[in-house]
Image (cartoon, rainbow, N blue to C red):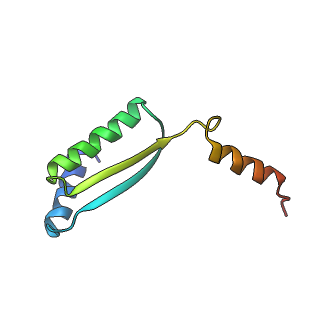
């Protein structure tokens, strides 16, 4: 499905409920600032423009596992937990 058809579907959904504003939360494995991350941000801007701001996209790009304290803590706790 290309962007144009997905945008049309999104407009149709929003038109069915014109008073409802939503925020779509999207987590991605694309690194922050990568071509893919920028494409997701651009898609979110297109959605907001096409729906007069009623649909917003909040994307969360992937963090580097080596620099993420949460990731390091999860790995440390997983390695110390005995497996059945």
Against 35, is 61 above or below? below
Q: Is residue 26 left or right of residue 47?
A: right
The residue under the point 27% across, 53% down is: 56
The residue under the point 14% across, 66% down is: 18
Name the residue furthest front: 69
Q: Is residue 77 left or right of residue 84?
A: left
Residue 39: x and y in percent read 33, 36
Q: Is residue 2 visible?
A: no
* Residue 12 vs residue 81, the one in the foreground: 81
The residue under the point 14% across, 53% down is: 52
Against 11, is 66 above or below? above
Q: Is residue 72 visible?
A: yes
The residue under the point 28% across, 43% down is: 43
Residue 28: x and y in percent read 46, 45
Q: How many marks?
A: 0
Residue 19: x and y in percent read 15, 68
Against 36, is 71 above or below? below
Q: Quadrant of the C terminus?
A: bottom right
Residue 32: x and y in percent read 46, 34
């Amino acid at each position: 499905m290309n962007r144009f058809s997905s945008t049309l579907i999104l407009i149709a959904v929003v038109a069915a409920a014109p008073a409802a504003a939503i925020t779509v939360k999207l987590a991605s494995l694309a690194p922050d600032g990568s071509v893919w991350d920028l494409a997701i941000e651009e898609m979110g801007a297109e959605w907001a423009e096409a729906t007069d701001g009623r649909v917003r996209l909040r994307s969360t790009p992937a963090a580097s596992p080596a620099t993420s304290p949460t990731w390091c803590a999860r790995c440390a706790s997983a390695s110390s937990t005995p497996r059945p």
